[in-house]
Image (cartoon, rainbow, N blue to C red):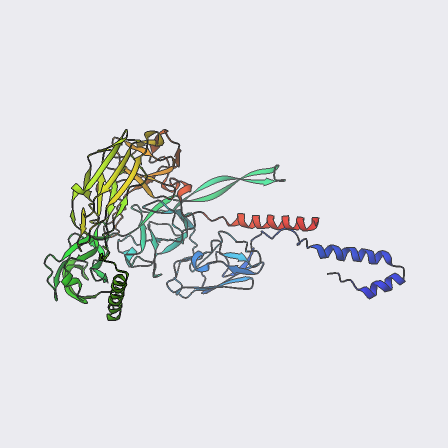
Amino acid sequence: MFYFNRKYAIRLLKRGAIPVVLVATFLYSCASVGTLGGGDYDEAPPKFLKGSPSPNELNATKKRISIEFDEYLKLDKPQEKIVISPPQVQQANVRTSGKKVLIDLQDTLIPNTTYTIDFGDAIQDNNEGNPLENFVYTFSTGERLDTMEVAGTVLNAMNLEPIKGMMVGLHADLGDSAFISKPFDRVGRTDSRGHFTIKGIAPGEYHIFGLQENDQNYFYSQPTEMVAFNDSLVIPTFELRMRQDTTWIDSLVIDTIVERQYTHYLPDKLILKAFINNKKDQRLAKSERTTSKDFTLFFTAPADTFPTIRGLNFDETDAFVIERLTERIDTLKYWIKDSLIYQLDTLQMEVSYLYTDSLKQLVPRTDTLRLASKEKPKSQKDLQKEQEEKEKEEKRRRERGDTIKVEPKIEFLSVDIYAPASVDVYDYLTLTFPEPVASFDSAGIHLQQKIDTLWHDVPFELQQDSLDIRVFNLYADWKAGESYSLQVDSAAVVGIYGRFIDKQKKDFKVKTFDSYGQVFFNISGAKDGDFVELLDSKDEVVRTVNVENGRADFYYLDPGKYAARLIRDVNGNGIWDTGNYEQHLQPEEVFYYPQMIEFKANFDVLQDWDLNAKTLDLQKPDDIKKQKPEQKRDNNRNRNNNRNNNNRNNYRR
């Protein structure tokens, strides 16, 4: 830094040194505008110098590993990114100290074992955060260093999403119980693309598993843990391959191309499909009574039959309307019909159901419940205040001379009618009520079509929804481009608590055929019984059709972008079913059409689809993947370019 000294400049002037002062002043003024910044950002990662034990050392005995680099360091998410194999049941202490990474192993070293510490990209320089990628440190406690590797990808079995941060492990013990009782022999962890590599493997045969564990014991111990397994044994091998290494004179001119031999390890494209086991212990998880008129029972797993209830302070005979809140019998809402029962502060009852015992068998069990309403009742003070307000209003009415008695305001049963202004030709209308319906007079429902200028009644079918008892569906043979009106008479529907609906009317128009497009799939490898789900840009289901003779046809689609996946419905229940490790049952197979399909109105798309043309990890379109690959190096380059641009702008000023 140059400091301008005024007194010193005056002395120089007296000595005739004016040019020197002018140069100094010029330098000072330039420095005050801006700093050139010392050039580009450092993009070089830290360089390894030495370690203890040394890399690939044999007969190592130290539980502290010290690895030294050429600059000061920091660790990025070490608990997430650093993987030690064999896995450490007692978590290792990993930290930086200046230019060193220190690892203190807490577990006892296993004799005659290769240890690998895979840092991924956790090691970074302290200033710029440049990561040292794919850095692996290896040593052995025996006379041999094992060098075999296996690699692959872990995908969510239901939607083929890559799974980040999932543990993948090998077992040399080929018994079925090893995965549920012993820690892995060797481990790796998936990156943001779902990719994994397990290093330091000895020759032999292994079972491979994926585990998104919750308790860090390195084996499958909780039913809520996501798991994956391979039906075939994994046998590590290698082969010699050739690659071309290129050196460049500059960014455009090649200097030399040299062929080099290297060792490639196999298998390197394993696919593991992860799922959550469908077998859960069945028990009553909780019960609640949010309002006085209903209560809900929550079970941990679906059952084949409803539980039975015996009232202890009420008569349970025909006392409830039971609503399933899910497709399977695991969450049940009980609507209390009798006012003498729901006015009780606390309901006392016995609930009998099937329960999973310690031997994993379903046995009868009875629990006694006391359910108090969480709904705050009106206090005596509030009731008195309401009565006083009524009396005051009556007094004001008499003083005004009103002779017409004001009738109390009717509290109608609300209804939510799904009948948008523009209805699809394949769609149906729905009427949803806040409580179960006691009576429904279909004669009070009127559907009319406008023909020329007149309205004409048209036939329709009204059905209670098979899953939701509070929903009624109205089906009709819609005519494209025509106008319709739905009218519901007052008191046509009465709820179980005596309220009836007010008069309702909805006018709407059915879309024309030329506002739609169609997609037709010819599918190679499909089977009858499979079904295809058409998906939107958020990977959510828009429409489902069954595969027939290798075809899946979608009519009357709104223009836009779509994806598609096929479900191999083995048991024919119309839904995707997860797997079960104890039964050695893989989840049902899922395939994605590997591209997005986009079309405009009045377009038909005929698309060939080979289910096996691409491996599963390459099938799902990137547009709908939620787990995106991380791009860290590009961020550093962008930051460097931004800084260079700022420096140039400062210099111009």
Query: Which of the pair 97/311 is nearer the observer?
Result: 311
Residue 278: x and y in percent read 25, 52
Query: Which of the pair 554/642 is nearer the observer?
Result: 554
Tell which residue pokes out farthest to the bottom in this image.
381
Relative side of 469 to 13, left or right: left
- Asked if 25 appears above or below 256 in the picture, the reply is below
> Residue 117: which quarter of the image?
bottom left
Q: Residue at x 59, y 41 (%)?
A: 247
Tell which residue pokes out farthest to the front in this image.
401
Residue 561: x and y in percent read 39, 37
Q: Residue at x 40, y 40 (%)?
A: 621
Can residue 377 be seen by looking at this rendering? no
Relative side of 226 to 109, left or right: left
Q: Residue at x 76, y 56 (%)?
A: 27
The count of marks equals 0
Quadrant, the N terminus: bottom right
Can residue 148 be seen by looking at this rendering? yes
Query: Which of the pair 137/425 is nearer the observer?
Result: 425
Residue 200: x and y in percent read 42, 53
